[in-house]
């Protein structure tokens, strides 16, 4: 259980480390999408915020539907919603989702969710039966988000901008791959001497 406790704690911490700069970075991604022809060129301007009297900022794509063009799909729609603290940038809630129809007429959906934690005392950020089956930061991939069984894949503690990078890497690659393998290797992130890895395809035999 230790890994799931640590993951939940990491998801909680990531809300406060996001800072204030993420909104500009998100606009940069949306602007690049428009320039690449995946969506309207003004989409980045439509990602705007409304500040409530409570100090909560609601960020979302305003106006008409955010239509999105990707290969293999008749059409798609992009949705972004972020609830944050006006002064600190603390992330209370995050939803990044894309839905569409494939060329064969079947639906598809991909989404990343971080639940609203404003009622933390009542467990608002602790949904489902536990941190394994319903990790705080998780993604859905399927025909729709309501199709049973509702499968959720836990994500590591990604910054809000990294979440968007992951989503775009699924939809608009190769032009929107945030970590190309060539760059990863050049950065020295893969210095493993595989000859020294003592791995086995089969579990070790248990001794009686």
Image (cartoon, rainbow, N blue to C red):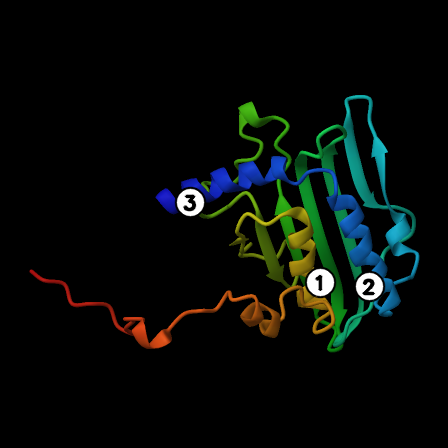
Q: Nearer the viewer, residue 76 or 80?
A: 80
Q: Earlier in the sequence, mark 1 or mark 2?
A: 2
For the N terminus, the quadrant is top left
Q: Position of residue 137 (x, y in %)?
A: 57, 46
Q: Which residue bears the numbered disc 3?
A: 4
Residue 26, percent from left and from top: 77, 51
Cα gap from disc 1 to disc 3, whole angstroms: 27 Å
Count of marks overlaid on the render: 3
Q: 73 left or right of 154?
A: right
Q: Residue at x 48, y 38 (%)?
A: 9
With respect to residue 137, does 153 lie above or below? below
Mark 1 touching mark 2, by CB under 8 A? yes
Q: Is residue 9 visible?
A: yes
Q: Residue at x 64, y 52 (%)?
A: 112
- Residue at numbered disc 1: 168
Mark 2 and mark 3 in contact? Answer it, CB < 8 Å.
no
Q: For the residues carrying marks 2 and 3, which lies nearer the camera in this image?
A: 2
- First in residue order: circle 1 vs circle 3: 3
Q: Is residue 197 left or right of residue 153?
A: left
Label 2 belongs to which residue?
33
Q: Looking at the rendering, which quadrant does residue 41 occupy?
A: bottom right
Mark 2 surroundings: few (<14), some (14-19) or many (≥20) residues within 10 A: many
Looking at the picture, does residue 84 appear above or below residue 131?
A: above
Which mark sits nearer the N-terminus, 2 or 3? 3
Q: Is residue 146 above or below residue 16?
A: below
């Amino acid at each position: 259980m230790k890994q799931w406790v640590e993951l939940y704690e990491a998801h909680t911490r990531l809300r406060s480390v996001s800072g204030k700069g993420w909104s500009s970075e998100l606009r940069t991604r949306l602007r690049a999408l428009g320039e690449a022809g995946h969506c309207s060129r003004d989409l980045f301007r439509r990602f705007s915020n409304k500040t409530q009297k409570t100090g909560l900022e609601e960020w979302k794509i305003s106006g008409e539907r955010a239509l999105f063009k990707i290969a293999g799909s008749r059409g798609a729609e992009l949705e972004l919603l972020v609830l944050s603290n006006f002064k600190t940038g603390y992330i209370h809630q995050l939803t990044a989702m894309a839905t569409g129809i494939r060329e064969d007429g079947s639906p598809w959906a991909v989404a990343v969710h971080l639940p609203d934690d404003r009622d933390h005392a009542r467990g608002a950020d602790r949904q489902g039966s536990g941190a394994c089956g319903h990790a705080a930061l998780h993604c859905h991939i399927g025909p729709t988000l309501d199709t049973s069984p509702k499968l959720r894949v836990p994500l590591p503690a990604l910054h809000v901008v990294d979440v968007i990078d992951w989503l775009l890497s699924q939809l608009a690659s190769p032009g929107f791959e945030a970590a190309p393998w060539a760059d990863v290797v050049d950065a020295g992130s893969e210095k493993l001497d595989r000859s020294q890895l003592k791995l086995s395809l089969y579990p070790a035999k248990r001794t009686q």
